[in-house]
Image (cartoon, rainbow, N blue to C red):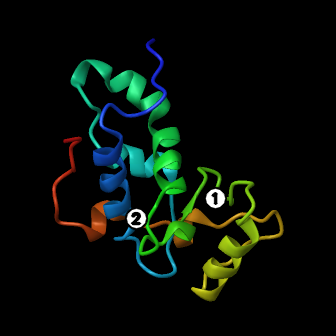
């Protein structure tokens, strides 16, 4: 399997990620991997590799997001906040929006997961 360190068109990819994250409603979260699934692989023959690297690409985009992107609404696939310097701030922002953490510091994704396919009428974005 080929190894990708970044999307072919990094800025175009990042913009697609940020547009998706801007759609997450207050009090809801999604994961890096779920965002990656919403963006088509760069080319059909690279779809398998994209599934392996997409969540990392989304993480890279989120690390560079503009101020108007609600970055705190993106968590890992286990419903936890990934370890990083601003993790405490992320939790505070989510709790301010009504998101609840359990005793294991996990978010119940059955309750707080953004179900984008139910809330969006737009077609799947594709990498430009």
> Image quadrant of residue 98?
bottom right
Where residue 85 sits: x, y (%)?
A: 75, 61
Q: Secondary structure at mark 1?
A: loop
Q: Is residue 62 above or below residue 42?
A: below
Query: Quadrant where the N terminus lies?
Result: top left
Q: Is residue 86 above or below residue 77?
A: below
Q: Kindly identify which numbered label has been placed on residue 114.
A: none
Q: Earlier in the sequence, mark 1 or mark 2?
A: 2
Q: Secondary structure at mark 2?
A: helix
Query: In the depicted view, which residue is nearer to us: 109 or 39?
Result: 39
Where residue 78 sits: x, y (%)?
A: 65, 52
For the residues labelled 1 and 2, say whether their Cβ atoms are less than 8 Å apart.
no
Residue 27 lies left or right of residue 91; in this view the side is left
Where residue 76 sits: x, y (%)?
A: 61, 52
Q: Is residue 98 above or below residue 25?
A: below
- Say how many tags the image has: 2
Circle 2 Cα neighbour tier, 10 Å, few/some/many (<14 / 14–19 / ≥20): many
Query: In the depicted view, which residue is nearer to us: 69 or 52?
Result: 69
Between marks 1 and 2 in the image, the one whose residue lies nearer the viewer: 2
Residue 28 lies left or right of residue 13; in this view the side is right
Q: Who's the residue at 70% across and 80% down the image?
A: 92
What is the spatial separation of the Cα atoms under label 1 and label 2, in whole angstroms?
16 Å
Circle 1 Cα neighbour tier, 10 Å, few/some/many (<14 / 14–19 / ≥20): many
Query: Quadrant where the C terminus lies?
Result: top left
> Image quadrant of residue 81?
bottom right
Q: Is residue 86 above or below residue 92?
A: above
Residue corresponding to mark 2: 21
Q: Kindly identify which numbered label has been placed on residue 79.
A: 1
């Amino acid at each position: 399997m080929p190894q990708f360190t970044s999307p072919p068109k990094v800025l175009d990819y990042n913009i697609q990620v940020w547009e998706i994250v801007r759609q997450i409603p207050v009090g809801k979260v999604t994961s890096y991997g779920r965002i990656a699934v919403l963006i088509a692989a760069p080319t059909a023959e690279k779809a398998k590799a994209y599934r392996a690297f997409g969540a990392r690409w989304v993480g890279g985009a989120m690390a560079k997001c503009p101020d108007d992107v609600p970055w705190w609404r993106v968590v890992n696939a286990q419903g936890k906040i990934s370890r990083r310097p601003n993790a405490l701030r992320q939790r505070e922002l989510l709790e301010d929006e009504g998101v609840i953490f359990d005793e294991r510091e996990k978010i119940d994704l059955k309750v707080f997961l953004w179900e984008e396919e139910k809330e969006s009428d737009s077609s799947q974005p594709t990498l430009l």
